[in-house]
Structures are given as structure tokens and as C-alpha cells.
Image (cartoon, rainbow, N blue to C red):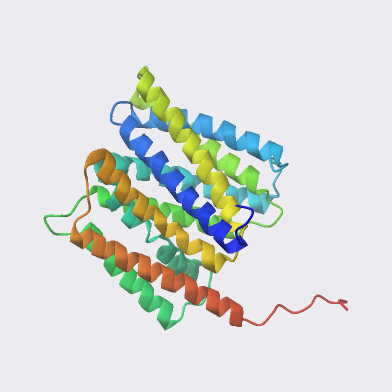
Amino acid sequence: MSGLSDNTRGAVLMTVAMAAFVLNDTCMKLVTADLPLFQTIFLRGVLATAGIALVALRTGGLRLALVRADARLVGLRCAGEVLATGAFLIALRHMPLANLSAIMQSLPLFITLAAALFLGERVGWRRMSAILIGFAGVMLVIRPGTEGFDVWALVGLFSVLSVVLRDLSTRRLSHRAPTGAVAFLSSAAVALSAGAASAIEGWEVPAPGAAVLVVTAAGFLIVGYITVIMATRTGDVGVVAPFRYTTLVFAILAGAAVWGQFPDLLTLAGAAIIVASGIYTFQRERALARRAPPPPAPPGAA
């Protein structure tokens, strides 16, 4: 990709990351049909944590000493990661991948709203309108009170709220907290929590095919983690970040190819509304950030 611009490279990397995450989800949905859920999460978590640790060691980012404020925030982030992973994979066992992916696309809207409610960030009427429209799209996907309602969609929505806790905690971390260490601790927390839960749920000896799927899922998860970090550090964030929504396209393709499932028109309409609202909200935030006055120079600066 040496001949590409930074924006193009960033967009390609973000698209690769989203494809890797969907392939990880596909493998997990397949394998949890045969293996106990928490055993599967634990096995994948051990492999993924080891891979993240190796990458962090090679880049010098595995420094686990954190100041007290960061340690508290990392604890909250780990709790959000554990809850989000468990809820997402529980929902994934019981509902189509594309439908769950559509619900997960509402994450930027929830983060913007939560930042306004809990972090005091200002949200004007345009972004608030986009958030409300996006939530209407979520209702089209979930459809409470109708024949198409799926209770597992609420579990998926709980996963979104848990990711909000994770991401808001991440926002508050200081620059002294190494990215590699934060990712390692979060991954380890998921693996340890799943290991504890699997002791209650029970274990089964994985068949060779199931073992291959677990290893493959862990590999795709590591690729996703690495490429999404590379993408966010390459090119303009206003160009690269919207490519996160390609995950919905990949989820639809995977659901159709592997399970013969294709979302109905209401789900597609809701997903389109969610994506459009999210992109508008993000671009509006970028425009406001560009208009904001620069921070004052520190005392004594020339």
C-alpha cells in the first residue's frame, strides 16, 4: 500500500479490521452451537490475550504500572469489556448476525448521548435530533411489542450500553496509560471472567473442527485489534472512521453465505437510518472540533 495516500490506507485498514471482526463473530457463532459459550470465550480469550501480549511486547507497550486514577478507569473499562463480550455472544447465539450488527451500529449515538449526560459535553439540537432519529432506527430493528420482536435483541442492546461504559472510561484515561497494556488487561479480564463462568457452565472436549474455529476466531480478533489501531493512526479520522460501518455489509454477507439468513426490509431500513444518523453525528462533531478555538498557550511559552 506504499503508493496509496494516508487516507486511502487508513480506509483500507479500517475495512480490513471490520471484516476481521465479522469473521471472528462468524467463527464464534458456529463454534458455540457445539461448545459451551463461556468455555469458548475463555479459550479464545487465552489465545487472543497471548497474541496481544506478544504484539505489545514487541512495540514496548506492555507496561502494566498505572497511576491510581488510570487503574480505576481501566477497572471500569475491563468491567464494560466483560459485560459487552458476554452479552454480545449470548445474543449472537440466538439471533442473526446481521440483525445484531445493525443494533451495534448505534454505538456512536449512545456514546455521544452518554458523553453529554455524564461527561458534560455539549450536544446541540442538530446532533440530538440525529441521535433521536438513530434511536428510531434501532426501534425498527428491535420492533418491541410486535410479532417480529426478538427478546435477544435487548441483550444485544445491553452489549451496546456496556461498550459505552468501556469507551467512556477509555476517554478519561491519561496519555500515560499504554495502549498495549490497556488492551492486554481488558482481554485478560474477559478470559478470566469466562474461565470462572465456565467452571459453573461445564466443559466439553472440543472436536478438531471446533478447536480450529476457536483458534481462527482468536486469529481474526487479533488482526482486528491490530488493524483498527493502525487505521486510527493513519489518515484523517473524519475520512477513516465512517468505514467502521462496513461491518454491517460484511455481517449481511456472512449471514447470507453461512446461514442463508438475510435481514428483512424493516431491519435494512432501520440499519440505514442508524448508519446515516451515526455518520452525520460524527461529521458534526468533527466540524465543531475544527471551529473550536485552540487551547491557550502554557505560561512562559514563547
Q: Could one spot residue 35 in this view of the protein?
A: yes
| Image quarter in which the C terminus is found | bottom right
Residue 32 lies, with reference to residue 248, above or below; the image says above
Q: Residue at 47%, 53% (x, y): give it.
A: 15
Q: Which one is nearer the viewer's eye here, 83 or 257?
A: 257
| Residue 132 relative to residue 286: left or right | left
In the image, 89 versus 218, the foreground residue is: 218
Q: Is residue 54 above or below residue 239?
A: above
- Report which quarter residue 188 is drawn in: top right
Please state the horizontal and vertical placement of residue 257, each as a whole percent of the image: 27, 42
Percent x, y of residue 22: 39, 45
Quarter-of-image position of residue 280? bottom left
Q: State the image coordinates of residue 83 (x, y, percent, origin top left).
A: 42, 45
Residue 66 percent across, percent down from the top left:
69, 46
Task: Answer left or right for 251 relative to 113.
Answer: left
Residue 180, by quadrant, is: top right
